[in-house]
Image (cartoon, grey):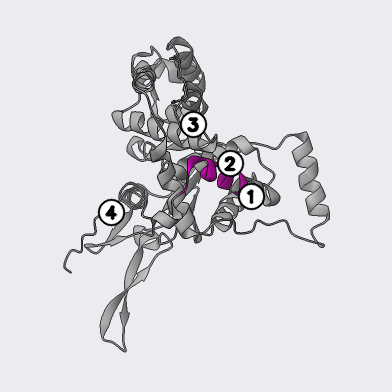
């Protein structure tokens, strides 16, 4: 077959009529979060971090035990944002074509037709991604990094926006294939939902008790074009030279820490910059501050570091290393633009 190559436009496309100010974007994000919390008992901070992944045009990796609401959360995001949603259950026998699609012979037309796989959707929940073999992981890696998939030599563009929420189970060790460092680095954010607090768990039971009356669910808040417009808003955030220096220093400090064998890559530094700008939008602020960087650093940096053998034996917490780095780097003073 001839190779079909499609160039991916990394910047969101939207009309001027749909363009949003930072304040408008912040207000719409608040509406999305409130709507999702109608369906899922979950902390606002966590929802903000997932939205940082979306606004920065990246992807999110969740490491959690089963039963914490990952599927419901991803589905609620898709509903509130007005986007298509597919869930892919990754298993040891999952093949790349099971994800990307395959050619099927059409007897009536006498030709092969491409049958799209579940990856062709706006929001993908890649459940238990580390249970899939490396070849299948590589197919997802291409989709995440390039916004396209290649099957039988033909390359096809994925929908825009394209957002992957992948999960892996930290307690499931047998039958897993550890994610390669290159694939982990593709995730802008790595986080955990965690268990609800006492009040949240009581509310969960209360909702379960009333399930015959109504099942909590989210409603559509935005639409496809509005989401694309949201993804363009971080470009409006002003970033001073001092803040550029600060982000660079934070990144470089991870490479010289005595417990770290491999620190943040230059690509990781760019992701920290992009995620910090997205956090600024969520806060409704048109300029970047050190607080924005600190708010996203733990979720952006920790999974990109590779510890030394000694640190691994000592079970050193990567989050604590990020905390040390943030404490040792001088914080610049940033004033609101005139």
Where is 48 relative to 291, above or below?
Answer: below
Instruction: Identify the residue shown where x is 38% and y is 28%.
Output: 239
From the viewer's perspective, tell me whether residue 172 is left or right of residue 40: left
Give how far across and how far down residue 29 sits, in percent: 56, 45
The label number, if any, that marks residue 47 in the structure image:
2
In what element is the residue under mark 3? helix
Q: Give the residue at the far bottom of this rendering.
A: 108
Query: In terms of depth relative to the viewer, which is nearer, 30 or 180?
Result: 30
Q: Confirm or deny contact between disc 2 and disc 4 (CB under 8 A).
A: no
Q: Are marks 3 and 4 in contact (CB under 8 Å)?
A: no
Residue count near mark 4 (Cα–Cα under 10 Å), binned few <14, some 14–19, many ≥20: few
- The quarter in which the N terminus is drawn is bottom left
Disc 2 versus disc 3: nearer the observer: 2
Quadrant assignment for the C terminus: top left
Q: Secondary structure at mark 4?
A: loop
Write down the residue under mark 1: 36
Q: Earlier in the sequence, mark 3 or mark 4?
A: 4
C-alpha separation, residue under disc 3 versus residue under disc 4:
27 Å
Mark with earlier residue (2, 4): 4
Q: CA distance from mark 2 to mark 1?
A: 9 Å
Residue 252 picture quarter: top left
Task: Name the element at disc 1.
Answer: helix
Compute the Cα span from label 2 to label 4.
28 Å
Q: Residue at x 20, y 64 (%)?
A: 4
Circles 2 and 1, Cβ within 8 Å, touching? The answer is yes
Against 299, residue 76 (above or below) is below
Residue extent of the magenta highlight: 20-31
**Cα–Cα span, label 2 and label 3:** 13 Å
On the picture, is 1 further left or further right than 222? Answer: left
| Residue 280 sits inside the magenta stretch | no
Depth check, front residue: 224 or 186 = 224
| Label disc, if present, on residue 8 of the rendered structure | 4
């Amino acid at each position: 077959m001839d190779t079909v190559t499609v160039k991916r436009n990394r910047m969101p496309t939207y009309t001027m009529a749909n363009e949003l100010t930072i304040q408008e974007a912040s207000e719409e994000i608040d509406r999305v979060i409130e709507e999702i919390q109608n369906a899922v008992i979950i902390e606002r901070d966590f929802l903000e971090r997932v939205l940082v992944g979306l606004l920065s045009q990246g992807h999110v990796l969740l490491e959690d035990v089963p039963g914490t609401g990952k599927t419901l959360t991803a589905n609620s995001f898709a509903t509130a944002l007005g986007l298509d949603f597919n869930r892919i259950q990754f298993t040891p026998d999952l093949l790349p074509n099971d994800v990307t699609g395959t050619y099927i012979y059409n007897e009536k037309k006498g030709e092969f037709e491409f049958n799209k796989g579940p990856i062709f959707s706006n929001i993908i929940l890649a459940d238990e991604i580390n249970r899939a073999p490396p070849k299948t992981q590589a197919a997802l890696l291409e989709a995440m990094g390039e916004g396209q998939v290649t099957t039988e030599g033909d390359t096809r563009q994925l929908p825009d926006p394209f957002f992957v929420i992948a999960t892996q189970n930290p307690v499931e060790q047998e039958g897993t294939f550890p994610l390669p460092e290159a694939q982990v680095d593709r995730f802008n954010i790595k986080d955990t939902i965690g268990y609800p607090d006492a009040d949240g768990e009581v509310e969960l039971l209360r909702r379960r008790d009333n399930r015959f009356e109504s099942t909590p669910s989210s409603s559509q808040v935005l639409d496809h074009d509005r989401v694309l417009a949201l993804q363009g808003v971080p470009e409006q955030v002003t970033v001073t030279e001092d803040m550029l220096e600060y982000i660079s220093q934070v990144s470089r400090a991870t490479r010289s820490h005595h417990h770290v064998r491999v620190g943040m890559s230059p690509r990781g530094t760019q992701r920290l910059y992009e995620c910090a700008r997205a956090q600024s939008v969520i806060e409704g602020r048109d300029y970047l501050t050190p607080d924005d960087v600190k708010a996203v650093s733990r979720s952006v940096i920790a999974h990109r570091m590779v510890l030394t053998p000694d640190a691994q034996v000592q079970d050193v917490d990567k989050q604590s290393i990020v905390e040390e780095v943030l404490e040792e780097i001088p914080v610049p003073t940033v004033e609101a633009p005139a």
